[in-house]
């Protein structure tokens, strides 16, 4: 591994992605850029062939790839934090081991944007959603540039910002999230990360109008294949975590109340969770 500080660190966390990981790493290696790139793969004690696949790549490209693994399964939040400790780049690109990139100039385009636009902390792009057999499930027919502010994200707007599209500025303030105990109680860590990064820096997210990655829906996916009821329960849990740990003006508070009523209240009432619904509404009044 080179001692020179790279422009971009690719942070790839993985768990039981043995059948997909090679595709992801190959998409990292195909990147063409006028700057140095390092790849850091963090395995969370997988029980399949993930570790052997990652080690093989690290042995073949020792100057470019670092592999790290936990001694016991710790969960995606801890795996992300542990893997980021080895990332030294000015920018950090995220991609989990079951997703991959499709444009060989993806990182160059995103870095060029961030270098020329200091008021943005994250740059994303559009992505294609595929199934386990690489069949397309969804792709936006007409991508257009998007800008998301902290208040947009707070209101639930985060279109086309999936983890495999994210590249962000490696600044200390962004990683302060990992020192917040409540972070480890959230389910959608990527959403909380984007919220915290924009809130803490006062900067925005830019979404490039290009499809440059694939997000894979599969049985082993952490989020994509969760039961609908469980997914809703986790979204409500994260919503309550957000309103209690982020700051917002009175007008935004009213918007959050309306968002809760529109998206979650009926579900809470259908499960006879009257006390929980009451507490959330009361908090936002």
Image (spheres, helix red, strand yellow):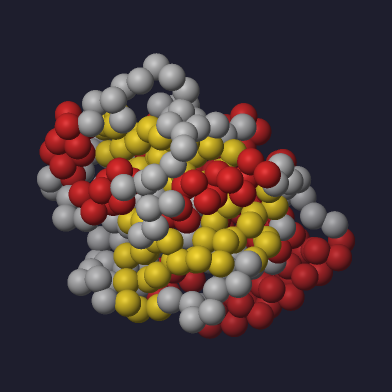
Question: In which quadrant will I find the C terminus?
Answer: bottom right
| Residue 101 location (% of width, % of height) | 36, 56
Question: Which residue occupies 48% across, 60% down?
Answer: 162
Question: Which residue occupies 38% across, 71% down?
Answer: 129
Q: Nearer the viewer, residue 155 or 131?
A: 131
| Residue 196 location (% of width, % of height) | 64, 46
Q: Nearer the viewer, residue 18 or 177?
A: 18
Instruction: Tell me how many marks there are.
Output: 0
Question: In which quadrant will I find the N terminus?
Answer: top left
Question: Quadrant of the rendered structure where residue 54 is?
Answer: top left
Question: Which residue occupies 67% across, 72% down?
Answer: 260
Residue extending farthest to the front is: 34
Does residue 83 appear in the picture of this structure? Answer: no
| Left or right: 172 in relation to 210 | right
Q: Nearer the viewer, residue 163 or 113?
A: 113
Question: Which residue occupies 47% across, 56% down?
Answer: 165
| Left or right: 78 in relation to 252 | left
Does residue 43 appear in the picture of this structure? Answer: yes
Question: Quadrant of the rendered structure where residue 230 is?
Answer: bottom left
């Amino acid at each position: 591994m080179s001692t020179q500080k790279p422009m971009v660190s690719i942070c790839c966390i993985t768990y039981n992605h043995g059948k997909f990981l090679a595709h992801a790493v190959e998409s990292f290696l195909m990147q063409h850029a006028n700057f140095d790139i390092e790849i850091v793969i963090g395995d969370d004690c997988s029980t399949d062939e993930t570790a052997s696949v990652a080690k093989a790549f690290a042995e073949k490209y020792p100057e470019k790839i670092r592999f790290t693994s936990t001694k016991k399964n710790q969960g995606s939040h801890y795996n992300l934090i542990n893997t980021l400790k080895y990332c030294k780049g000015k920018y950090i690109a995220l991609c989990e081991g079951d997703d991959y990139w499709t444009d060989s100039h993806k990182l160059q385009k995103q870095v060029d944007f961030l270098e020329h636009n200091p008021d943005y902390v994250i740059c994303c792009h559009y992505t294609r959603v595929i199934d386990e057999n690489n069949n397309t499930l969804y792709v936006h027919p007409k991508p257009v540039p998007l800008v998301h502010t902290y208040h947009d994200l707070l209101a639930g707007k985060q279109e086309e910002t999936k983890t495999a599209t994210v590249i962000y500025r490696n600044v200390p303030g962004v990683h302060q999230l990992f020192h917040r105990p409540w972070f480890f109680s959230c389910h959608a860590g990527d959403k909380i990360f984007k919220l915290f990064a924009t809130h803490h820096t006062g900067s925005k997210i830019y979404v490039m109008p290009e499809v440059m990655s694939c997000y894979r829906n599969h049985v082993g996916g952490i989020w994509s294949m969760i039961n609908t009821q469980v997914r809703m329960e986790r979204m409500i849990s994260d919503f309550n975590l957000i309103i209690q740990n982020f700051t917002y003006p009175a007008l935004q508070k009213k918007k959050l109340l309306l968002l809760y009523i529109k998206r979650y209240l009926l579900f809470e009432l259908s499960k006879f969770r009257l006390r929980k619904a009451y507490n959330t509404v009361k908090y936002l009044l």
